[in-house]
Amino acid sequence: MRRLLDQDLSGLSPRDLSIMRNEIFARHSYVFNDPVLKRYFLQQPWYTPRHRNSYSLLTEIEKANLARILSFEKPP
């Protein structure tokens, strides 16, 4: 895992940014309540829902990437 750069995110659709952001949580087995995200990640062979709160499992790079993705999803 590496820190995301602006060029990694520019031009992505809001849906793609949302999936990218939530994949960080999904990789830590987060249990999604949102039916769209739940359905999407249940289709991924690597996803196993286990945790209702996975934020404490994230690395510092993942936390930084979440913040960067959010800044593209919700510009000032």
Image (cartoon, grey):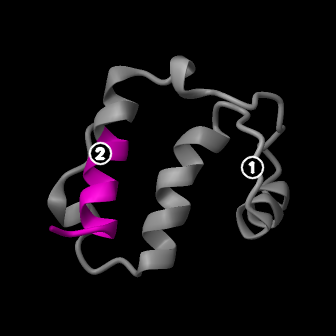
Q: In which quarter of the image is residue 51?
A: top right
Q: Which of marks 1 and 2 is nearer the N terminus?
A: 1
Q: Quadrant of residue 35?
A: bottom right
Residue at x-position 27% and y-position 80%:
11
Q: Furthest residue to the front?
A: 76
In the rendered structure, the answer to whether residue 27 lies left or right of residue 67 reads: right
Looking at the image, residue 28 lies above or below residue 18: above
The x, y position of residue 36, in whole percent, is 74, 70
Q: Which of 3 and 13 is in front in this view?
A: 13
Q: Is residue 15 visible?
A: yes
Q: Is residue 1 visible?
A: no
Residue position for label 2: 67
Q: In which quarter of the image is residue 47?
A: top right
The amino acid at mark 1 is: Phe
Magenta segment boundaries in residue numbering = 65-76
Labels 1 and 2 touching (C-beta < 8 A) = no
Quarter containing the N terminus? top left
Q: In the rendering, which numbered label is found on residue 12?
A: none
Residue at x-position 53% and y-position 42%:
24
Q: Residues within 10 Å of mark 1 (few under 14, many from 20)?
A: many
Numbered marks: total? 2
Looking at the image, residue 33 lies above or below residue 40: above
The x, y position of residue 52, in whole percent, is 74, 31
The x, y position of residue 41, in whole percent, is 75, 57
Quarter containing the C terminus? bottom left
In the rendered structure, the answer to whether residue 48 lies left or right of residue 9 reads: right
Q: Residues within 10 Å of mark 2 (few under 14, many from 20)?
A: few
Q: In the rendering, which numbered label is found on residue 32?
A: 1
Residue at x-position 25% and y-position 50%:
68
